[in-house]
């Protein structure tokens, strides 16, 4: 194995098994031959990929990056060969890295995982739920499910859902603090917000008499970093929140949360997209997930 792909395969197996001997047994090579190939790869790249100890191997940060990319390349090569050998039809396979916001992931993605994996059993799903903004390329995610406008023009997006925003509170909170009749009343209410936005926040409204839009600065004693937490605190009667309606619809339906200031609702929409790198040839596992989510959501 004196080619780049061969070196990649040896390195990937060595990194996964953390052993020259184990990789050698799998590849039917001697441990010294495996070690020499990894050393040759390091020499060609002019960087250390593994730290050798008497008991095991540990990847360097550069080794972690190379492993991630090498696995993708090998998966793409295998898929390309399948496409050619099967006349264009290939079953989705390989590791699929997906990032989603916590609230959307818990409510809409996680319940669909069993069905997706049953349909595509050769896909290994790597799902991360976070409300922090990620760089899809830097974090090496295949698909990120996010709300808002698409800023990076190198990425493509497919809309999964539109959700109107709403201000809600628990009935117990409204009994204690009163129901705000107009946005100006919010100065005496605890308005909970997200800490990954600005340190201060304004909520948009529209005057029902004139149709004029305006914003109202809100304040509260709680800031959180994800949707489920702020919703739980709202259900517990801590304060008001303003979120996409999909976060809270089931709780509105059963009366545990109550929309407020609906006469002043500006009607702004939270757009939910599946965002992915704009490669000309999208891997079948990525296309399969995007099509599946669009179909089921």
Image: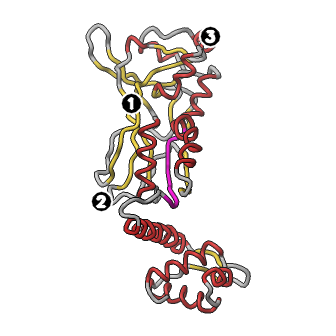
Q: Residue furthest right?
A: 55
Lower position in the chain sequence, tag 2 or tag 3: 3
Left or right relative to 10: residue 204: left
* Cα–Cα gap, marks 1 and 3: 33 Å
Front residue (pair 80, 3): 80
User: Answer yes or no: do the residues labelled 1 and 2 have beta carbons within 8 Å?
Assistant: no
Vertical order, 186 against 200 (above or below): above
Vertical order, 68 against 266 (above or below): below
Q: Which percent across, then down, holds residue 249? A: 52, 22
Q: Read off the residue under disc 3.
A: 176
Considering the whole magenta stretch, tell me its main secondary structure.
Answer: strand
Q: Which percent across, then down, holds residue 56? A: 70, 79
* Cα–Cα gap, marks 1 and 2: 27 Å
What span is in magenta?
Answer: 93-102
Which residue lies at the image location 42% right of the left edge and 15% below the top edge? 183
Nearer to us: label 1 or label 2: 2
Front residue (pair 174, 150): 150
Left or right relative to 155: residue 243: right
Lower position in the chain sequence, tag 1 or tag 2: 1
Quarter of the figure with residue 113: top right
Mark sitting on residue 162: 1
Q: Read off the residue under disc 2.
A: 280
Q: Which percent across, then down, holds residue 293? A: 45, 41
Colour scheme: secondary structure
Nearer to us: label 1 or label 3: 1
């Amino acid at each position: 194995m004196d080619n780049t792909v061969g070196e990649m395969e040896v390195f990937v197996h060595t990194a996964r098994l953390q052993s020259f001997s184990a990789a050698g047994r799998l590849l039917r090579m001697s441990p010294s031959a495996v070690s020499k190939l990894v050393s040759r790869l390091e020499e060609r790249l002019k960087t250390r990929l593994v730290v050798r100890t008497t008991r095991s191997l540990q990847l360097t940060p550069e080794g972690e990056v190379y492993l991630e990319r090498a696995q993708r390349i090998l998966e793409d090569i295998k898929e390309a060969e399948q496409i050619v050998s099967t006349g264009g039809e290939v079953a989705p396979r390989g590791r699929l890295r997906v990032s989603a916001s916590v609230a959307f992931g818990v409510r809409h993605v996680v319940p669909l995982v069993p069905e997706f994996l049953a349909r595509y059993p050769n896909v290994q799903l790597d799902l991360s739920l976070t409300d922090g903004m990620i760089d899809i390329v830097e974090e090496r995610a295949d698909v990120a499910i996010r709300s808002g406008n698409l800023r990076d023009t190198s990425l493509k997006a497919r809309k999964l859902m539109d959700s109107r925003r709403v201000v809600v509170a628990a009935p117990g909170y409204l009994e204690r603090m009163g129901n705000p009749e107009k946005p100006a009343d919010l100065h005496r209410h605890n308005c909970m917000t997200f800490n990954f936005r600005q340190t201060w926040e304004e909520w948009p409204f529209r005057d029902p008499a004139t149709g004029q839009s305006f914003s109202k600065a809100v304040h509260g004693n709680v800031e959180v970093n994800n949707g489920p937490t702020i919703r739980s605190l709202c259900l517990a009667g801590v304060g008001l929140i303003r979120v996409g309606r999909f976060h809270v619809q089931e709780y509105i339906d059963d009366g545990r949360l109550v929309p407020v200031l609906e006469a002043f609702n500006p009607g702004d929409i939270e757009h939910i997209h599946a965002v992915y790198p704009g490669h000309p040839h999208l891997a079948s596992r990525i296309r399969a997930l995007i099509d599946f989510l669009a179909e089921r959501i």
